Every structure is written in structure tokens, then in C-alpha cells.
Image (cartoon, grey):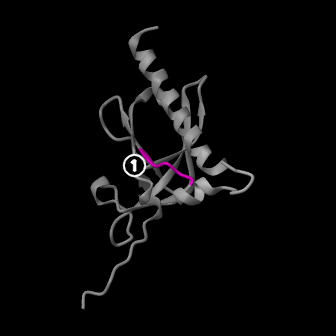
């Protein structure tokens, strides 16, 4: 197995592990405390960015919804074909407007928009703070 194939397989495995962790948040039920883990964390999503083989952040869009984003949630991983289904997270700036600049994003919103990607085009995964999914944007009056 050549080194390129090995690293691609590693990215597929990493996304699969991320999916397992995310599922643990949502599906972890106990007899006495129910879904306490999801309640403690406050979300069922672990947001992330993906870096392509070219060194750019992966950006996906949906023309019908008018959204372009570099922020994702893992929905499923096909280990055999090294592909993944991602849902797009809507990136919002301080004013609550869509933004494509990662440094301007203060909040992420889940969407139902999903895209399938070829994981062999990915070289790195950057996890983000889950606080970005729970943060409320509050704009107080200036005076």
C-alpha cells in the first residue's frame, strides 16, 4: 500500500471515529439519567473544517438555499469507498448574517443540506468548539 493510499485511509478512519463520538453524544442513554451526556454538552454535533490536498479549506454550497460553507457535521462514512456524507452548517457573523470568512464566524446553525464527498481529497480535519452551535447572538443597543 503506497503512502498516499495509507493517509487517505487514515482520514476516512478519522471521520468514522468522529461519527462514533458524535453518535455517543446523541445516543448515550442510561437507565437513571437518560441522555445526560447530550444535555451536559448541549448539542449533538461536533463541528469541523476539512483541509484539501491542495491546502485549502473545503467549501461546499447549495444554490437553492443560498448557502456556502466551510463548516460541517458528519452524517455517515462509507469506509469501503472512502466517502462521507456531510451536512452543511450555516456560518453566521456577529450581526447574524452569512459569512464565508472563518475568522468572522461566531455561530453555526445546523441545516438539513447534505453532500457526499470523496475523502481521498482530504488531508486534515480541524475540530471546532461546540460552543459555536450553542452561542446566542445578542446585539445590545449602543446607548
Main secondary structure along the magenta-highlighted residues: loop
| Apparent side of residue 27 relative to residue 130 in the rendered image (left or right) | right
Residue 129 colored in magenta in the image: no
Q: Residue farthest to the top?
A: 1
Percent coordinates x, y for residue 20 in the rendering:
59, 38
Horizontal relation, residue 11 to residue 34: left or right:
left
Q: Is residue 54 left or right of residue 61?
A: left
Residue 110 image position (x, y, % from top left): 53, 58
Q: Which residues are magenta?
A: 44-48
The residue furthest left is: 143
The residue under the point 52% across, 56% down is 41
Residue that numbered label 1 is attached to: 128
Q: Quadrant of residue 55?
A: top left
45 drawn magenta: yes
Task: Report crowding for label 1: few under 14, some 14 to 19, many 20 or more residues within 10 A (C-alpha).
Answer: some
Q: In this rendering, is residue 7 above or below 104?
A: above
Which image quarter holds the C terminus? bottom left
Residue 102 in sight from this viewpoint: yes
Can residue 117 be spotted in the picture?
no
Q: Residue at x 54, y 33 (%)?
A: 17
Q: Residue furthest right?
A: 31
Residue 16 x, y percent position in the rendering: 55, 33
Q: Residue furthest bottom?
A: 143
Rendered residue at 47%/48% (across/down): 72
State which quadrant residue 78 falls in: top right
Is label 1 in a helix, a strand or a loop? loop
Q: Is residue 70 shown above or below 10? A: below
Q: What residue is rendered at 34% in x and 65% in y?
A: 93
Of residues 55 and 61, the one drawn nearer to the viewer in this rendering? 55
Amino acid at each position: 500500500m503506497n503512502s498516499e493510499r495509507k493517509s487517505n485511509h487514515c482520514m476516512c478512519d478519522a471521520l468514522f471515529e468522529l461519527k462514533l463520538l458524535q453518535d455517543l453524544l446523541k445516543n448515550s442513554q442510561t437507565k437513571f439519567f437518560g441522555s445526560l451526556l447530550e444535555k451536559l454538552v448541549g448539542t449533538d454535533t461536533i463541528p469541523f473544517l476539512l483541509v484539501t490536498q491542495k491546502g485549502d479549506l473545503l467549501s461546499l454550497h447549495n444554490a437553492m438555499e443560498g448557502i456556502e460553507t466551510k463548516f460541517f457535521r458528519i452524517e455517515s462514512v462509507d469506509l469501503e469507498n472512502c466517502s462521507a456524507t456531510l451536512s452543511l452548517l450555516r456560518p453566521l457573523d456577529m450581526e447574524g448574517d452569512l459569512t464565508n470568512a472563518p475568522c468572522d464566524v461566531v455561530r453555526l446553525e445546523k441545516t438539513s443540506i447534505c453532500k457526499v464527498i470523496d475523502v481521498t481529497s482530504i488531508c486534515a480535519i480541524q475540530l471546532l468548539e461546540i460552543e459555536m452551535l450553542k452561542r446566542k447572538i445578542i446585539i445590545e443597543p449602543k446607548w
